């Protein structure tokens, strides 16, 4: 049975070889040992067919390509280890140009004679025994019309010797051109695989060996690249020959199990459910044993092992194809296309093995099939990498969003903690207090501390909810007591608003069974949200019996929330409105507390109408000891506080803008020592209306305001008022360096972080008030010392809006920008000074826009140069006299190139010397007392930015 199978295999393989020879060889003579070749019509010919052969004294015919395995000459079998001479006569026209004969890879030694002259000897036929395992091209000059070719073949290593591919003869140019073309194709094929291997292995190494598929794919590519480079024209052998290296055939054989190993492991990672562990383990053992054999075994035993390995490789390839087919059947991504590619690879490998069993080499199709397979796998891997990259990008984006939310959470937490601390520190630092005021301040400090304690409870509950959960100890408690406590707690915060907290109870004796501390925490969060988002109107705390329980809720008349805002508000660290302050934990923690009580928070909200948050708690009965004893009160109780100016005073005043009433009370008492009336506003629109009527001498502004941020307020005000006309002191709990820089760049004069000491706040406020007053005095001094009409003419020619009116306000003189400015309102004028002849000078600031830190440096230098040159001096004099710049002679002209670089943003150094600029500006101020407030403002903003971040002026 085995013999019949072997015969059938030989017949099939012989048929395949015959068909291939039909397309790959030229016409040869029907008689043995003679070939006819028309050297003029055909550039070269493959000498495939019957060659005459001799061994010892036996003569006969052997076919090429092929080996003498199981062959006989004159009835005598040829042993595997033998020396056989092949010879043939090539009939061709008489040729004058040289010919080239290509001999295939020797199995395992050659000696070549052409027309009786020895031209080549390798291996056994050489004195040094050096084996050259690559095809040889031998050039010779034909003599007459017949060329006799004799090839001695000696075999000791393989199962049988012979020539596994036919020699070729042809014109020298055509043969070398064909060789170069073959080397280019094989080099490109191997180079492509080597590049793919390098990329995959580099990615595997860069990824810290996380994704093993890249390792096995790179191993497969590298193995096939080496296998392909040692086949055909063997470009790799020719390349290594220059370094004295001669890779043996065993190296090429070793690449086959490595390539199949990498392919199997790679495919198993793609489809782990279809590839079983046992076949892969067996192949690992086979591959490992064969690699060891390639090192320690030589000669014919290694060739026998190679044949056995080829059979095992065929079976493993069939298994890989089968497993991939199962993956396609299970509709795994990419499995169907990979099955088709593996099918092509299996057919090519089976063809190569079948031809090799016949002792022939007609060019391996396996590497080509493997290239197709690997390219397709590379595309699949690239597609998978693209998916993974997209997934990683999405994850990074989610992490960045989460990080941004956490950063905002920390910033808001800081604000919520620092704002009450400002009240406590501010009130504690006030010494001069009457008894009534001292009692009021003590109550305010107590309420603020309780707010702080509730916020800390929220933060602690956040950790408890993540780990062990929230525990409650329910006891009977009166609803009115809790409502009145919260009403009193929030009264200081809303006393500056048109807002009331109303208690609505159907029965004063209503009681619930709950944890007192936790219930107060829930109501504090709900009421805090209502106070935060409700500008005016009523906030109602209500309770009434419902379904055998007590429904408790908080209802406001605020802006309400849509479905998306409501979904965000229920998430941890999130808020329904981004323009508001707060930690963003209130609703999630309230949900957790009520869940621990066996209840749930229900939220009904309508945009433009308001929000109603309510929940149910079990009803309880009060004993005489726990019954409420205070008289019922329906509205927020009145409270005594420091007198604050409600109407616009006649003289200059200080305006406070903050949404926290406790902060407003505290700042009013702290700043009352500056001898300026203080007006406190908790609503932005009220504050802006007051500023439009008459700008204050100083605006103290919080950044985190409802509906509109303090940044927007600063930017809007700076479009109409210069820093000297309306100084803005930002007092905020936002302490991030980026927030301070942004506020200063938008035009804020100074920035303080809550909580700050009362003395520091007063000193900063006094400095801004003094700067504003100094500006007015400088202009008055300039008008007194110089000719007023001359100054007016200079101003009319400038870009700044300026007009001159009589005492009744009638326009006398003005430039175009000044006429437009006075039409929009004289309240926004930066200066309104009396002149001789019952006239008044009105001067508006130039429009302010946000500037980068580096542009501020350039603007300061340009303004210093302008003021200096208007006084009749040159910029070279400024450079010399300031002592900060080097002046050189350029021919007969003095120049300061470094000074000029600082007056243009394009040429400003990457790391500018800020000290030079500040010294130059101060030099101008000292020598030109009426240099103008714009220069002072620029200098103040530069110094403020440098105090926040000294590296802010460095170009990135």
Image: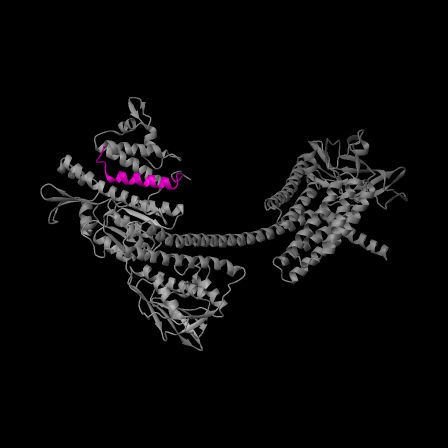
329 is higher (above) or lower (below) than 40:
below
Considering every residue shown, the one lying at the far top of the view is 892
- Residue 760 can be seen, yes or no: yes
Frontmost residue, 193 versus 294: 294
Question: What are the residue bounds of the magenta stretch?
Answer: 928-952
Considering every residue shown, the one lying at the far left of the view is 837
Quarter-wise, where is residue 858 in the image?
top left
397 is higher (above) or lower (below) than 477:
above
Q: Quadrant of the C terminus?
A: top left
- Magenta stretch contains residue 856: no
Q: Quadrant of the N terminus?
A: bottom right
**What percent of the width, then of the height, locates residue 793?**
15, 38
**What percent of the width, then of the height, locates residue 217?**
65, 48
Magenta stretch, main secondary structure, is helix
Considering every residue shown, the one lying at the far bottom of the view is 547
Q: Is residue 700 found left or right of 225 in the rendered image?
A: left
Frontmost residue, 479 versus 372: 479
**What percent of the width, then of the height, locates residue 747?**
31, 46
Q: Is residue 195 found left or right of 390 in the rendered image?
A: right
- Residue 719 can be seen, yes or no: no
Q: Is residue 674 found left or right of 814 in the rendered image?
A: right
**What percent of the width, then of the height, locates residue 379?**
59, 51
11 is higher (above) or lower (below) than 951:
below
């Amino acid at each position: 049975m085995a013999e019949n199978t072997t015969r059938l295999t030989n017949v099939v393989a012989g048929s395949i070889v015959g068909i291939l020879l039909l397309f790959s060889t030229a016409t040869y003579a029907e008689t043995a040992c003679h070939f006819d070749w028309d050297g003029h019509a055909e550039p070269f010919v493959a000498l495939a067919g019957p060659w005459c052969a001799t061994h010892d004294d036996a003569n006969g015919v052997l076919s090429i390509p092929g080996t003498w395995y199981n062959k006989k000459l004159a009835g005598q079998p040829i042993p595997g280890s033998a020396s056989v001479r092949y010879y043939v006569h090539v009939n061709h026209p008489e040729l004058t140009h040289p010919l080239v004969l290509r001999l295939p890879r020797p199995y395992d030694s050659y000696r070549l004679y052409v027309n009786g002259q020895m031209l080549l000897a390798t291996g056994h036929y050489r004195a040094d025994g050096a084996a050259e395992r690559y095809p040889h091209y031998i050039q010779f000059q034909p003599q007459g019309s017949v060329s006799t070719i004799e090839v001695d073949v000696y075999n000791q290593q393989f199962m049988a010797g012979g020539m596994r591919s036919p020699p070729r003869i042809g014109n020298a140019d055509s043969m070398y051109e064909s060789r170069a073309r073959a080397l280019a194709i094989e080099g490109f094929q191997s180079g492509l695989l080597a590049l793919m291997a390098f990329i995959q292995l580099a990615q595997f190494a860069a990824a810290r060996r996380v994704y093993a598929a890249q390792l096995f794919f790179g191993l497969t590519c590298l193995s096939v690249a080496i296998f392909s480079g040692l086949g055909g024209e063997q470009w790799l052998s020719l390349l290594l020959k220059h370094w004295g290296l001669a890779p043996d055939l065993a190296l090429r054989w070793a690449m086959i199990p490595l390539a199949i190993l990498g392919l199997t492991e790679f495919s198993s990672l793609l489809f782990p459910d279809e590839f079983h562990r046992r076949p892969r383990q067996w192949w690992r053992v086979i591959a490992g044993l064969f690699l060891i054999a390639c090192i320690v075994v030589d000669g014919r035993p290694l060739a026998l092992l190679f044949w056995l390995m080829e059979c095992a490789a065929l079976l493993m390839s069939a298994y890989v194809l089968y497993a991939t087919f199962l993956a396609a059947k299970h509709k795994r991504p990419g499995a169907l296309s990979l099955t088709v590619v593996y099918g092509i690879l299996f057919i090519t490998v089976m063809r190569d093995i079948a031809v090799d069993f016949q002792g022939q080499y007609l060019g391996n199709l396996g590497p080509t099939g493997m290239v197709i397979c690997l390219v397709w796998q590379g595309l699949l891997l690239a597609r998978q990498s693209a998916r993974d990259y997209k997934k990683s990008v999405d994850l990074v984006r989610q992490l960045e969003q989460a990080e941004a939310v956490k950063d905002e959470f920390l910033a808001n937490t800081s604000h919520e903690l620092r704002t009450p601390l400002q009240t406590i520190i501010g009130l504690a630092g006030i010494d001069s207090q009457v008894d009534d005021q001292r009692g009021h301040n003590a109550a305010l400090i107590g309420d603020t501390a309780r707010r702080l304690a509730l916020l800390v409870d929220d933060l602690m509950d956040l950790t408890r909810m993540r780990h062990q959960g929230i525990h409650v100890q329910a006891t009977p408690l009166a609803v009115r007591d809790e409502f009145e406590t919260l009403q009193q707690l929030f009264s200081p915060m809303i006393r500056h608003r048109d807002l009331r907290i109303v208690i609505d109870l159907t029965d004063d004796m209503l009681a619930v069974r709950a944890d007192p501390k936790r219930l107060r925490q829930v109501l504090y969060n709900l009421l805090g949200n209502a106070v935060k988002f409700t500008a005016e109107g009523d906030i109602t705390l209500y309770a009434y019996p419902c379904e055998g329980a007590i429904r408790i809720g908080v209802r406001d008349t605020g802006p309400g929330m849509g479905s998306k805002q409501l979904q965000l508000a229920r998430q941890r660290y999130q808020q329904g409105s981004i323009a508001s302050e707060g930690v963003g934990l209130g609703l999630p923690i309230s949900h957790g507390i009520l869940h621990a009580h066996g209840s749930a928070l229900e939220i009904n909200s309508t945009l433009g109408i308001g929000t109603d948050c309510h929940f149910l708690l079990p009803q309880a009965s009060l004993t005489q000891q726990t019954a409420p004893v205070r008289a019922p009160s329906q509205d927020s109780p009145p409270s005594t506080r420091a007198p604050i100016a409600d109407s616009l005073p006649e003289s200059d005043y200080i305006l406070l803008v903050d949404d926290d009433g406790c902060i407003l009370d505290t700042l009013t008492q702290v700043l009352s020592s500056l001898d300026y009336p203080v007006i406190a506003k908790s609503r932005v629109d009220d504050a802006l209306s007051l500023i439009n009527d008459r700008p204050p001498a100083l605006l103290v502004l919080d950044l985190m305001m409802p509906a509109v941020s303090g940044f927007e307020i600063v930017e809007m005000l700076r479009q109409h008022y210069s820093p000297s006309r309306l100084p803005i002191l930002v007092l905020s709990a936002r302490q991030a360096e980026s927030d301070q820089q942004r506020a200063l760049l938008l035009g804020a004069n100074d920035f303080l972080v809550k909580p700050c000491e009362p003395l520091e706040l007063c000193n900063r406020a006094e400095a801004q008030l003094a700067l504003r007053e100094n500006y007015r005095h400088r202009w008055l001094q300039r008008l007194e010392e110089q000719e007023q009409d001359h100054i007016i003419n200079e101003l009319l020619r400038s870009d700044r809006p300026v007009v001159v009116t009589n005492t009744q306000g009638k326009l006398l003189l003005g430039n175009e920008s000044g006429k437009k400015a006075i039409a929009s309102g004289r309240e926004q004028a930066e200066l309104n000074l009396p002149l001789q002849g019952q006239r008044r000078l009105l001067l508006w600031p130039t429009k302010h826009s946000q500037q980068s830190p580096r542009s501020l440096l350039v603007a300061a230098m340009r303004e210093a140069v302008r003021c200096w040159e208007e006084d009749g001096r040159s910029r070279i004099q400024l450079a010399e006299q300031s002592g900060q710049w080097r002046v050189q002679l350029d021919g007969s002209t003095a120049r300061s190139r470094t000074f000029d670089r600082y007056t243009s943003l394009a040429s400003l150094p990457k790391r500018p010397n800020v000290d030079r600029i500040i010294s130059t500006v101060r030099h101008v101020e000292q020598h030109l007392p009426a240099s103008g407030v714009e220069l002072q403002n620029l200098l103040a903003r530069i110094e403020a930015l440098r105090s926040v971040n000294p590296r802010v002026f460095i170009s990135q």
